[in-house]
Image (spheres, rainbow, N blue to C red):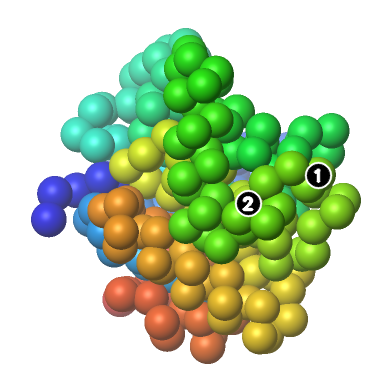
Amino acid sequence: MSSALELINISKNFAQGEAKISALKAINLNLKKGEIVALIGPSGSGKTTLLQIAGLLDCASFGQVLVDGIDATKADDKMRTEIRKKHIGFIYQFHHLLPEFSALENVAMPLLIQGKKRDEAFAHAKKILLEVELENRLDHKPAELSGGQQQRVAIARAVVANPSIILADEPTGNLDSELSEKVFTLLQKMVKSYGIACLVVTHNMVLAKKADRILSIKDGKIEL
């Protein structure tokens, strides 16, 4: 399988007064299309920083970031935004759905931002929502949905533009164990079905063991 995401010798340093803090230290990561990789580690280990750099929301101090073969390391803000829109989907612990819009409108939004025609965007969004078993909730706003349903909408929104990569930050963190398993299983299904690479930050070891691989990070280093 081809690589969707490559992090090559990634380091991230912060200045704290006169001291230098190393948040990430020579991280190397290769994520293949169609695989789901769990990233585990204690609080403060560098998980969020790694996700932000992989998602082009932050810049590394050193190293390269390749997204679907595109070297984004020296890209300007405009190009980084274009790469994110085309190649990267995000899922957050707090679903970040737009409260004033329906499930269908939330999922169609990435396509509308890309310039797709409204009818085309809504037809494809509906198709994805059916795949995440929300056929009876298309017109419901986030406040009218359960936590599990909200995260299914978030998964659909991440998938709808057919990205190369999904970056998920504690996507089941607010759900009970039964709902967590259902949502994670659904995420796996969509990743495999669409051939998307997925990096999932999680503290839930039961779910992490369901991933294709587990990576452990500690003190800014991937432990082998």
Residue 156: percent from left, percent from top: 53, 49
* 207 is higher (above) or lower (below) than 40: below
User: Which residue is identified by label 2?
Assistant: 153
* 114 is higher (above) or lower (below) than 54: above
Q: Which residue, as the protein is rendered here, is positioned at the far left?
A: 1
Q: Residue at x 47, y 64 (%)?
A: 187
Amino acid type, residue under disc 1 in the picture? Lys
Tell me the element at label 2: helix
Q: Residue at x 66, y 78 (%)?
A: 179
Amino acid type, residue under disc 2 in the picture? Val
Left-right relation of 30 to 88: left
Q: State which quarter of the image contains the N terminus.
A: bottom left
- Quadrant of the image occupied by residue 43: bottom right
Tell me the element at label 1: loop
User: Which residue is identified by label 1?
Assistant: 141
Looking at the image, how many numbered discs can be counted on the residues? 2
Q: Residues within 10 Å of mark 1 (few under 14, many from 20)?
A: some
Left-right relation of 170 to 52: right
Residue 150: percent from left, percent from top: 71, 56
